[in-house]
Image (cartoon, rainbow, N blue to C red):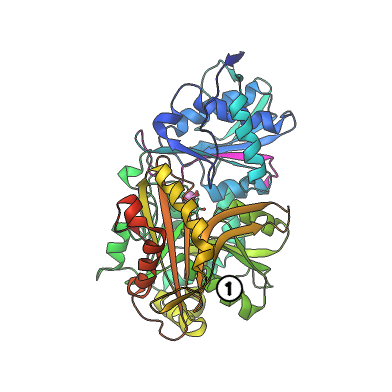
Amino acid sequence: MIKTVATTPFTDQKMGTAGLRRKSKIVMQPNYIENFVQSIFNVIGDLSNKTILLGGDGRFYNDIAIQKIIKMAAANGLKKLVVAKDGFISTPAGSVVIRKYQLSGGFILSASHNPGGENGDFGLKYSNESGGQVPTSVSDKIQQETLKITEYKICDCEDIDVSRLGNFKLENMEIEVIDGVKDYVEMMQQIFDFAALQKLAASGFSMRFDAMNAVTGPYAKEIFEKLIGFKDGSVVNFIPKPDFGGLHPDPNLVYAKELVDFMFSDKAADFGAANDGDGDRNMILGKGFFVTPNDSLAILTDNYKLIPYYAKGIYGVAKSAATSTAVARVAKAHNIGYYEVPTGWKYFVNLMDSNRITFCGEESFGTGSSHIREKDGIWAVLFWLSIIAATGKSVEQITTEHWQKYGRSYYIRFDFEGVDTAVADKLMADLEAKLPSLGGKTYGDFTVKEAKPFVYNDPVDGSTTKNGLVIYFTDGSRIVYRLSGTGSSGATIRVYLERLQTKDVLQNPLDMVSPLGKIALDVAEIPERTGKHKADVIT
Ligand code: VG1
Ligand code: CO
């Protein structure tokens, strides 16, 4: 039943910040996914002793891609494929499964927070045995392979029923269909004190979790309602839909509007949270209160002793360069290691594998720890609920007390979307050339201390990555510029603004950073070059 199909390369199969992401219609072209998957198999080499995980966030084309990959894996002589039931698994649960069963790696079909559907995006993330996405050295090899591919192997056979748990066989390959929820739930029970969380729920404390019609619905129902006991209806939009019900499953103030409106209304619950399409991002809200992911990382780290799994002590912490320096101050106070990496979770993996860090996070609503090698949306929510259960304080109280103790990094991100790629590339190149001349310049209240590209030297594998341009000011403020690496068309220019205040911690963030925003636009000539005088998304 194995057939070899002749093919020609696609020239656009380079992985970005997190896997390959393209418009669904591009991925649906004949041979597109086959070429990419075969290229990965070619790079892995001998598959006869390997077991790989396969699952996805359930978005449009998930089912079709799953069947293609099953048939290709069998045709390529893989020993065993572990398939998530119905093809559904969240990115963090995938990492749990790979690590728990010591698999060789995994394919997670997801374009994460990007919209889904026939007119949305599709994607594929490829992880190795660490349970984290492969480093750039490997993704570069895969890309080389995609450029010279001439054929792929696939079984010419019926679809495999992945709606039932159990073991099957296709050619010589074993297939095991597993429950993507069970192992994840067990891991969370090992980390957190569920009895304390049950007490919190029983006390009348209310929560709302918005799964945004994406993959975390079943996980959240099981954990928050069934196991912890928050009342029925606490988890909303919990049925995963191929197009996320038209939602843009990115948990932030703009796209999780329904939850934000609820939490800022007089009917608000005590606690609110949302996850993204594949369950690795989180947004945390209190009653009429929003916690930035930057502050969330700092607050979780500061409270590690309240969580059984971490209470004995933690290694260091890491953040992406674009993320605010809030966690740096916590690391200093606790006298633990502190690392700054390029944007993308894969850069944390080596630091976790080498026991340099326990916690890490990104400004883009990603928080996580070394329990796995991906960021983890539900984990962050459970961590927050645990802090609340242990302290009896509200989200707002916890956060404002944190600012009073450590100072506050006011933080806002501007996204300029749909910019012509050539315009964006030139803007970044010209800005980079200009950086050395900015040193010492004064703009209103702000004086530039230094301006340079962000360059990361990985202490574990020695690789060097350059990503983003940074302007540092003498008062601790920063402006970071980067181009997004997860979009599926055109360019998105991201501008990250941070302003540190040690005393004045209760102001409006946008007001506080807007002078920096003006400097950022002027210095990079964003309006002149893009025609945009205002960011498309402000988060
Ligand atoms: C964005 C975020 C980045 C995150 C990445 C993947 O990348 O900025 O912090 O790691 O998405 O998130 P970019 O290159 O567009 O800025 V998701 O939830 O895959 O997994
Ligand atoms: Co995601």
Q: Nearer the viewer, residue 401 or 505?
A: 505
The answer to whether residue 18 is visible is yes
Image label count: 1
Residue 506 forms part of the magenta stretch: no
Q: Look at the picture and state if 25 lies above or below 180.
A: above
Residue plotted at (34% across, 50% down): 530
Q: Position of residue 336 (x, y in %)?
A: 67, 74
Image position of 1 (left or right of 123)? right
Q: Residue furthest bottom?
A: 503
Q: Position of residue 461 (x, y in %)?
A: 73, 52
Q: Nearer the viewer, residue 85 or 125?
A: 125
Pick out the residue farthest to the front: 437
Residue at position x 47%, y 47% from top?
A: 278
Q: Quadrant of the C terminus?
A: bottom left
Residue 375 appears in view:
no
Q: Which residue is mark 1?
A: 328
Q: Quadrant of the N terminus?
A: top right
Amino acid type of the residue that numbered disc 1 sits on in the rendered structure: Ala
Q: Position of residue 268 (x, y in %)?
A: 30, 68
Q: Residue at x 64, y 46 (%)?
A: 135
Which stretch is magenta?
A: 100-118
Q: Secondary structure at mark 1?
A: helix
In the drawing, does residue 313 fall left or right of residue 267? Answer: right
